[in-house]
Each structure stands twice: as structure tokens, then as C-alpha cells.
Amino acid sequence: MSSPFDGGVVLVTGASSGIGAALARQLAGRARVLILVARRQENLQALAEAIGDKTACEIEPVDLSDPAAVDALAARVLERHGAVDVLVNNAGLGDIGLFERSDLSKLDFLAAARGAPLRGSPPAAPEA
Ligand SMILES: NC(=O)c1ccc[n+]([C@@H]2O[C@H](COP(=O)([O-])OP(=O)(O)OC[C@H]3O[C@@H](n4cnc5c(N)ncnc54)[C@H](OP(=O)(O)O)[C@@H]3O)[C@@H](O)[C@H]2O)c1
């Protein structure tokens, strides 16, 4: 059975470092298109260059805590591809310490980023 990763349009959030970047490298040569999303454009560019001609990469430097930017990203992706086959909703951050001392801006980001696929026109949902 073929996987939706193979020959598909795959959007990876948090692709500028860590797990997201490693996943994108693993998918090079399998996905037809890799849409690489994070804030650090230079990291995304370097990753796309490392992937080279194994897979077409599209760089999307987007702050996922910004709902308007997420909506604009969804609109661009839908315009280009109609839908994505796989969304790797990986962007995030770790926080260590007592909950009552949490940095609320970090919690706000996590809520926004995790809900990002549900906003506006979800990039993973094909048109009915
Ligand atoms: N590593 C672990 O042991 C572990 C354990 C449990 C869960 N996780 C989760 O796995 C995911 C990846 O972890 P990791 O270790 O690979 O972390 P990482 O290296 O810090 O990567 C986090 C990624 O999220 C992106 N990101 C953060 N804030 C963003 C924002 N506002 N808008 C867009 N992108 C944003 C970062 O890109 P920019 O900074 O360029 O925006 C980066 O690419 C995270 O969700 C993390 O919470 C990791």
C-alpha cells in the first residue's frame, strides 16, 4: 500500500530545526512537494538547498502564533495545490518548571499553533 507521503504534497511546520528539519530530510525524494514552515527563513533556505533536486521545496517563513499569517499561508497553499496530502503539525516549544510560573506567551503560542490547522481554510482539507 502506498503512503500519502510518497508523491504527495507535505507541509511540515517547525521545519527550521530539530525534529521538523530531520523529518523533511527523511521525506526528500519521497514527497513530490515539501512546504517548509517556520519563522527562521535562513534555516528553511539552507534546508531546501540541502534537499536540492530530490524534492521541490517551498519556503514559507510564517509565525504560526499570528492567526492572520496562518490564514494567509492556508490561502497560498490552497491556491498553489488545492490541498495538502499530509500536514506534519510539529512546530512547538518546550517549557520546564512549575506550571504557576509558566510564561503565558509560550502557552498562548502553543494554543495558537496547535489550532492553526483548524483556522480559515484548513490546508489539509480538500475542497468538497
Ligand atoms: N525534542 C523532544 O524531546 C520533544 C519532546 C516532546 C515534544 N516535542 C515537540 O516536538 C516538536 C519539535 O521539537 P524539537 O525538539 O524539534 O524543537 P525545536 O528544534 O525547538 O523546533 C521547534 C520548531 O518549531 C518552530 N516554531 C516555534 N515557534 C514557532 C512559531 N511561532 N511559528 C512558526 N514556527 C515556530 C521553530 O522554528 P522557528 O524558531 O524558526 O520559528 C522550530 O522549527 C515541538 O512541538 C516540541 O514541543 C519535542
Image: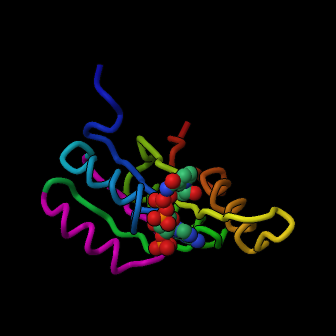
Q: Quadrant of the N terminus?
A: top left
Residue 49 drawn in magenta: yes
Residue 72 drawn in magenta: no
Residue at 41% x, 55% y: name it. 19
Determine the image quadrant of residue 103.
Answer: bottom right
Is 121 positioned to the left or the right of 105 in the image? left
Residue 118 in the image: state x and y as whole percent.
65, 50
> Which of 93/96 is in front?
96
> Which of 87/108 is in front?
108
Residue 32 in the image: state x and y as whole percent.
25, 47
Q: Is residue 9 above or below residue 128?
A: below
Is 87 positioned to the left or the right of 99 in the image? left
> Which of 82/19 is in front?
19
Residue at 63% x, 61% y: name it. 113
Q: Give the magenta range.
A: 32-53
Name of the residue lying farthest toward the top: 1
Name of the residue lying farthest toward the bottom: 42
Name of the residue lying farthest toward the left: 53
Residue at 38% x, 52% y: name it. 81
Q: Quadrant of the C terminus?
A: top right
Is 68 positioned to the left or the right of 35 in the image? right
Residue 18 appears in the rendering: yes
Residue 16 in the image: state x and y as whole percent.
39, 68
> Which of 12/97 is in front?
97
Name of the residue lying farthest toward the front: 97
Residue at 33% x, 55% y: name it. 22
Picture mark count: 0
Residue 37 in the image: state x and y as whole percent.
44, 65
